[in-house]
Image: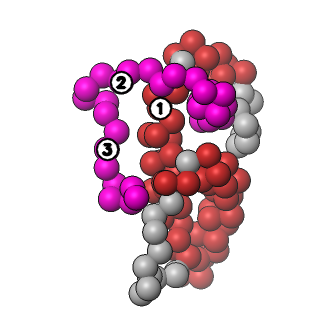
Amino acid sequence: MTLAGCRRWDKRSLAALKPLWDDLTAELPHIVCPATDNEENSVGFLLQRRVVEISDGILALRPYRSRAVEEAARRAVTPGSSRGGGPGGISRRAKRAGGAPRQLPPNRSRRSTGCER
C-alpha cells in the first residue's frame, strides 16, 4: 500500500470509529486523554489515540456487562451493525440506568493507560 493509501485508510477508519467514540466519551469523559501543547496531529496519531480511548471505554464498562445479556445481544445484533447494540451498547445503558457493576476476578482488573485524570 502506498503512503497516500495508508492515509486514506487512516482517515476512513477515524471517521468510522467516530460514532462509537462519541457514545463512549459522552458517557465516560475521563477516557479522553488530555491534549498537550506539542501534540502531534497526524491522522495516524489521532487514529491510534481514538482506538486507545475506545479500548479504555470498553474496559471501564466491563463491570456493567451481564453475561446473560451479553450473550443475548451477541445473538441479536446483526453483523455490520455499529451503533447501539452489542455488549458495549448494553453496558452503556446498564451504567446509565444506575446498574451495579459486577465484580471482576482479580486477574481481570482494569489496567491503567496513563490517560486517567
**In the image, farthest residue toward the bottom:** 38
Q: Quick check: can you spot residue 98? A: yes
For the residues labelled 3 and 2, say whether their Cβ atoms are less than 8 Å apart: no
Q: Earlier in the sequence, mark 3 or mark 1?
A: 1
Percent coordinates x, y for residue 115 in the rendering: 39, 60
- Magenta-colored span: 88-117
> In the picture shown, does residue 25 fall above or below 33?
above
Q: Are marks 3 and 1 in contact (CB under 8 Å)?
A: no
Label 2 to label 1: alpha-carbon separation: 8 Å
State the image coordinates of residue 84 (x, y, percent, origin top left).
73, 37
Is 59 placed above or below 48 here?
A: above
Left or right of 97: which side holds 44? left
> Toward which corner of the image does residue 95 lie, by quadrant?
top right
Q: Which mark is residue 62?
A: 1
Q: Which mark, residue 104?
A: 2
Residue 89 is a magenta residue: yes
Q: Position of residue 2 (x, y in %)?
A: 54, 79
Residue that numbered label 3 is attached to? 111
Q: Residues within 10 Å of mark 2 (few under 14, many from 20)?
A: few
Q: Which mark is residue 15?
A: none
Secondary structure at badge 2 equals loop
> Can residue 20 be seen?
no
Q: Say above or below: 82 vs 38.
A: above
Q: CA distance from mark 3 to mark 1?
A: 12 Å
Binning the other alpha carbons within 10 Å of mark 1 as few (below 14), some (14 to 19) or many (20 upward) gives many
Identify the element where label 3 is drawn: loop
CB-based contact (under 8 Å), mark 2 and mark 1: yes
